[in-house]
Amino acid sequence: MAEPVDSDLQVNSRLLVPAAELGWRFSRSGGPGGQGVNTTDSRVELSVDLNTLSTLTDFQRARLLLRLERRAVDGVVTIAASETRSQLRNREAARARMAMLLADTLTPDAPKRRPTKPSKRAKQRRVDTKVQRGHTKRLRGRPEE
C-alpha cells in the first residue's frame, strides 16, 4: 500500500522531504470527468523549494540546483498530475514522480568509458572467421565439371 499523501516524502535512504516543506496546489483538471468535471479540483501540483529544503546537505543542494536549473523556477521544482479523476490518486502520482525526479537527479554520473581497441589476436580471429565463412559458401556452389 502507498504511503499517506500527507506524510513525509522518502526520496532515497539519505533524503527525506518533510511534509511541511511540500507545497500543494489544486485546480480543475481538463478531460473526462462526468458530472463532477466542473466542480472538483482534481489536478494537483506538488512543489519543493530546493533553496530552503532543510534536509539537504550543501552538496545535494548544489547538485539538485545545477541539474534541475532548466526545470526549477527560482529553485522551486514543480510536478503536475492530472491523469486520473481522483485528487487522491493524482496526489499519489505527483509524490511518486517528485521522489523519482529527486532520486534520479541525485544519483552520481556513470564512470566515463575508456576507449579500447581490439588486440592483434582478436583481429586475426575475425579475419580467419571471415575466410572460413567464404570457403563454406564457395563449397555450396555448383560443382565444376
Image: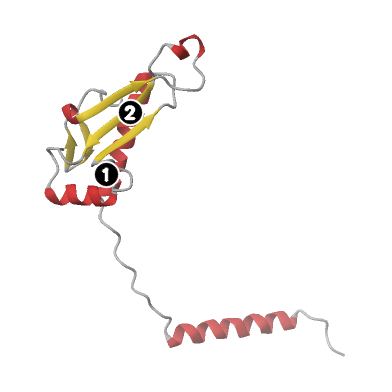
Q: Amino acid at mark 2?
A: Glu
Q: Which mark, residue 103?
A: 1
Relative depth, front residue between 125 and 59? 59
Tag 2's secondary structure? strand
The C terminus - image quarter? bottom right
Can you identify the residue that label 2 sits on? 45
Relative depth, front residue between 23 and 137? 23
Determine the residue positioned at 33% across, 28% down.
45
- Number of residues whose C-alpha sits closer than 10 Å to that of mark 1, classed few (under 14), some (14–19) or many (20 or more): some
| Image vertical order of residue 22 relative to residue 145, above or below | above
Q: Residue furthest right?
A: 145
Determine the residue positioned at 64% across, 80% down.
133
Could you say where residue 43 lies in the image, as x and y percent from the top left? 39, 23
Tag 1's secondary structure? helix
Relative depth, front residue between 79 and 74? 74
| Image vertical order of residue 40 relative to residue 5, above or below | above
Q: Are marks 2 and 1 in contact (CB under 8 Å)?
A: no
Could you say where residue 66 lies in the image, as x and y percent from the top left? 25, 52
| Image vertical order of residue 126 relative to residue 20, above or below | below
Q: Which mark, residue 10?
A: none
| Image vertical order of residue 69 relative to residue 46, above or below | below
Q: Nearer the viewer, mark 2 or mark 1?
A: 2
Determine the residue positioned at 33% across, 34% down.
79
Could you say where residue 37 lies in the image, as x and y percent from the top left? 47, 14
Q: Amino acid at mark 1?
A: Ala
Spatial distance from mark 2 to mark 1, Cα to Cα? 19 Å
